[in-house]
Every structure is written in structure tokens, then in C-alpha cells.
């Protein structure tokens, strides 16, 4: 495995810049194509969720609405889903509550899909994770037997759990808990809409294809950077899962949390932390920043063009002889 530029010979920013210049652009382009195709599948799956409601939407409206939502998430975390639903409602004349309901169903399916990918990562890389847990975290916990602060924190967590359980009935009436309950109910109702999908095999294909291509983005960017070029497909799976967890944290586009978790995961496979950090940024800025900005700006251009109304025809005026 070839090492990247040594951080001791240059500043962190200089290393990042030189590592970016060293990547193979063709593998990055392939990862961007995987990003594009995954979202075509997402748009098609969204169309299938809307069909049973009586709305036959233009798939490209759905695709560009998704791209616009990703673009918005870069500035305001989680606002993209609202913008995505509102955009489709505007151009397809769908009630916003129905559009958002299908997005809930879309995200519920994603939760199950991510759970499956997590399970696969645990199966294929269990030994790697267990050795890190055993030799790293567990050893530190054992060594901290005399650390009073740690035991105080554990005791307070136990007390908090007992209090929550004891007063759970009253907590159910609190506004925050009620909102959480309503969200969970909405998830359940959204999931029910999947049963009305007309072509289930096609729906399942797109659901699998979305997450397979998400995973391929990680694997393809492995090939673009010398220190990660020899890492295995199962290593890419674990790195992908760590990166997905980083994207869940409500930061603009996953900035910071994504790089931290991806760098940690890559370093588990013998890559230096400096090179792992470079890889995390190469992946993040190639896909999460470049692709989202590019396709987001194209969405602003193409949505009005796709939905441009034909000018009303002028009534003909018969000339009187």
C-alpha cells in the first residue's frame, strides 16, 4: 500500500491539497456517475410511491427535486426534505402533505436498508471491530478502575434511567415526547403506503440499487487514492457504514462528523490517520460537496425549463372582406 504525502514534511492543508491533486480523476468520475444513478433510482422509487395516490409524476421533476434538497442540506441541515417535497408539490400540483408522506415512507425504507448494510458490515468485519473494541475501548475502561469521574458519570446515567422509567407516564405528556411519538406514528403510516406499490419487484430493485450504488461510491473512491487502493470490498462496506453514521449527525452536509468517522474507519485497516483523513476529505468534497452543488445548481436551471408552460395560443381573427 503506497503512502500519501507525509504530514511531517508539510502543513495539513498542504498535504490535503497535494493528496487531492494525486487522485485518479477517472475513479472520481465513476463515483459521481454512481451518485447520479443512485438518485435516478431514488426518483423512480419516489414515483412508485406517488402512483397509488393518483399522481403520475414526471420522474425528472422528482430527480431534480431530490438534487435541490441535497443542495439545500449543505446550508441548512434537514431542510432539504421539506424543500424536496415542496418543489414536487409545486411542479406536479400534489398536496404538500401527500408529497411529504411519501418522503417519510422513503426514509423509513432507508432506515431498514441502512440497518441491513450495518449488519453486513458487522458480519464481514466483525473480527476487525472486535479487536479494536477489545484492545482499545475495553482496555481503557479496565484501566480506569480508579477513575472516580468515570464511575460518577456511570452512576448518574443509571439514576437518570431509573427516573425516566419511574415517571414515564408523565413524560409521555411532554411536548417533545408527543412530537417524537407523532413522528414515529408518521413513520408507521408512511411505511403502510409501500403495500400499495403496483410493481413490487421494480420497487425492490430500486431500493437495493440505491444503497448498492451508495456503497460503490466508497469503493470507487478507494481506487482513486493510492493509500486506499488495495483495501478490500468489505473494508469499503465498513467505511461506508461509518460515513453514513456521520451523515446522520445534523451538521451541514455531514461536515466534520463525516470526515471524523470515515478517517477512523479507514485507519482500522492499516492506513495512517493522516492519509485516512485525506481520503475522508477526498470522498466528502468529491461527492457531498462537488456533486451536490453541481446537480443542485442544474436543478435550479432545469426545473423551470422542464415545466415551462406553452404560451396560450392567440385566437385567430378572420379578416372581413
Image: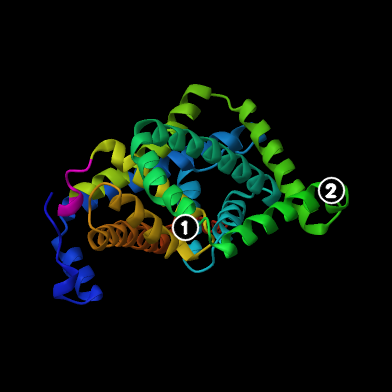
C-alpha span from label 1 to label 2 = 42 Å
At mark 1, the secondary structure is helix
Q: Which residue is at 23% across, 49% downward?
A: 270
Residue at 44 percent across and 54 percent down: it is: 140
Give the percent coordinates (x, y) of residue 86: 61, 56
Q: Give the vertical position of 281 relative to 203 (above or below).
A: below
Considering every residue shown, the one lying at the far bottom of the view is 11
Residue in view at x 45 percent, y 38 percent: 118
Magenta segment boundaries in residue numbering? 224-231
Q: Place residue 258 in its image quadrant.
A: bottom left
Horizontal side, residue 233 vs residue 104: left or right = left
Compared with 55, 180 (above or below) is below
- Marks 1 and 2 in Cβ contact (< 8 Å): no
Q: Quadrant of the C terminus?
A: bottom right
Q: Residues within 10 Å of mark 2 (few under 14, many from 20)?
A: few
Front in this rendered view, residue 191 or 223: 223
Q: Residue at x 40, y 43 (%)?
A: 134
Viewer-side residue, 142 vs 50: 142
Residue linked to disc 2: 166
Residue 216 lies left or right of residue 206; in this view the side is: left
Where is mark 1, residue-wise? 70
Residue 239 appears in the picture as rendered:
yes
Residue 176 image position (x, y, % from top left): 77, 57
Amino acid at each position: 500500500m503506497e503512502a500519501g504525502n507525509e504530514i511531517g514534511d508539510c502543513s495539513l492543508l498542504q498535504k490535503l491539497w497535494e493528496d487531492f491533486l494525486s487522485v485518479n480523476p477517472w475513479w472520481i468520475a465513476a463515483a459521481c456517475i454512481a451518485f447520479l444513478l443512485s438518485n435516478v433510482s431514488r426518483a423512480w422509487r419516489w414515483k412508485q410511491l406517488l402512483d397509488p395516490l393518483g399522481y403520475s409524476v414526471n420522474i425528472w421533476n422528482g430527480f431534480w427535486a431530490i438534487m435541490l434538497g441535497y443542495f439545500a442540506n449543505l446550508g441548512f441541515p434537514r431542510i432539504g426534505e421539506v424543500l424536496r417535497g415542496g418543489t414536487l408539490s409545486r411542479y406536479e400540483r400534489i398536496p404538500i402533505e401527500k408529497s411529504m408522506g411519501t418522503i417519510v415512507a422513503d426514509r423509513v425504507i432507508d432506515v431498514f436498508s441502512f440497518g441491513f448494510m450495518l449488519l453486513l458490515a458487522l458480519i464481514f468485519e466483525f473480527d476487525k471491530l472486535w479487536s479494536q473494541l477489545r484492545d482499545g475501548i475495553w482496555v481503557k475502561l479496565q484501566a480506569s478502575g480508579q477513575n472516580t469521574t468515570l464511575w460518577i458519570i456511570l452512576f448518574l446515567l443509571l439514576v437518570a434511567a431509573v427516573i425516566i422509567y419511574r415517571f414515564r407516564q408523565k413524560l409521555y405528556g411532554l411536548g417533545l415526547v408527543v412530537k417524537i411519538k407523532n413522528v414515529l406514528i408518521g413513520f408507521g403510516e408512511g411505511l403502510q403506503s409501500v403495500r400499495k406499490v403496483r410493481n413490487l419487484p421494480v420497487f425492490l430493485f430500486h431500493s437495493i440499487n440505491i444503497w448498492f450504488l451508495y456503497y460503490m461510491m466508497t469503493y470507487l473512491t478507494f481506487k482513486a487514492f493510492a493509500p486506499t487502493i488495495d483495501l478490500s470490498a468489505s473494508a469499503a462496506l465498513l467505511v461506508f457504514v461509518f460515513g453514513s453514521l456521520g451523515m446522520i449527525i445534523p451538521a451541514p452536509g455531514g461536515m466534520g462528523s463525516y470526515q471524523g468517522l470515515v478517517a477512523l474507519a479507514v485507519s482500522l485497516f492499516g492506513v495512517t490517520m493522516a492519509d485516512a483523513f485525506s481520503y475522508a476529505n477526498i470522498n466528502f468534497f468529491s461527492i457531498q460537496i462537488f456533486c451536490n452543488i453541481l446537480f443542485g445548481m442544474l436543478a435550479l436551471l432545469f426545473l423551470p425549463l422542464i415545466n415551462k408552460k406553452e404560451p396560450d395560443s392567440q385566437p385567430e381573427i378572420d379578416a372581413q372582406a
